[in-house]
């Protein structure tokens, strides 16, 4: 089990930087830093989830906005180094996709943004491009309220995976 002591010993600024790579909601980062020191990785995860679900939809959308659109490989390259690496790993099922699937993802992403006002969020880890396209197509049928809840759940999955990766690096 990774040592939580290393994370607790980080400067406030360094902890904020690392947490922001896990979830880019400013309020989430602020609340997570306030609650240090953490007793264990389990407590870190519990706090991360509790704080996430206490946030407002605008805080969630701030976190969503930090992600590159699924299939936008150029945007992946422009993100911060660690986040780009993690995003690339998460979207590796898309990287080698057929041009027609990537083009369909691009079009559906535009449709999604127009319909809901934020980018499509899905925990892409372990998913191929075709599966992501099917999920995106299906979720376009949701009501805005229903979709925001689903997107927040997907962001929570991403956040927890990234926290785990961060802990494993420490």
Image (cartoon, rainbow, N blue to C red):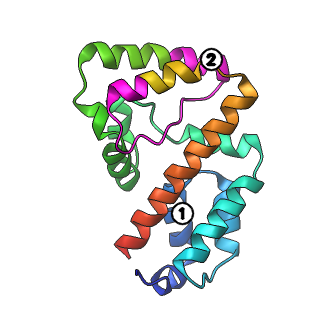
How far across and how far down the image is residue 27, in percent?
Answer: 71, 56
Q: Nearer the viewer, residue 54 or 32?
A: 54
Residue visible at 33% across and 20% down? 102
Q: Is residue 117 magenta?
A: yes
Residue depth check, mark 1 versus mark 2: number of the one nearer the observer? 2
**Vertically, is 42 above or below 120?**
below
How far across and how far down the image is residue 91, in percent?
Answer: 35, 39
Q: Is residue 166 magenta?
A: no
Residue visible at 72% across and 25% down? 144
Q: Quadrant of residue 31?
A: bottom right
Q: Quadrant of residue 74?
A: top left
Residue visible at 66% across and 30% down? 147
Spatial distance from mark 1 to mark 2, Cα to Cα?
33 Å
Q: Which residues are magenta?
A: 110-133
**Vertically, is 81 above or below 35?**
above
Label 2, on which residue? 141
Q: Quadrant of residue 12?
A: bottom right
Mark 2, secondary structure of its residue: loop
Name the mark on residue 19. Answer: 1
Are dots 1 and 2 in contact, CB under 8 Å? Answer: no
Image quadrant in which the C terminus is located: bottom left
């Amino acid at each position: 089990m990774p040592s939580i002591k290393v994370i607790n010993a980080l400067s406030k600024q360094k902890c904020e930087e690392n947490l922001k790579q896990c979830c880019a909601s400013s309020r989430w980062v602020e609340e997570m830093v306030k609650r240090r020191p953490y007793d264990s990785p389990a407590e870190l995860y519990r706090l991360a989830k509790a704080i996430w679900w206490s946030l407002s939809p605008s805080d969630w959308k701030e976190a969503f906005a930090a992600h590159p659109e699924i299939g936008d490989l150029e945007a992946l390259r422009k993100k911060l180094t660690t986040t780009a690496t993690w995003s690339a790993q998460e979207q590796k099922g898309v990287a080698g996709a057929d041009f027609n699937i990537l083009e369909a993802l691009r079009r559906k992403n535009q449709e999604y943004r127009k319909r809901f006002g934020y980018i499509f969020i899905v925990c892409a880890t372990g998913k191929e491009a075709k599966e992501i396209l099917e999920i995106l197509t299906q979720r376009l049928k949701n009501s805005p309220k229903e979709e925001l809840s689903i997107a927040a759940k997907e962001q929570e999955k991403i956040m927890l995976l990234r926290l785990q990766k961060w802990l494993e690096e420490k």
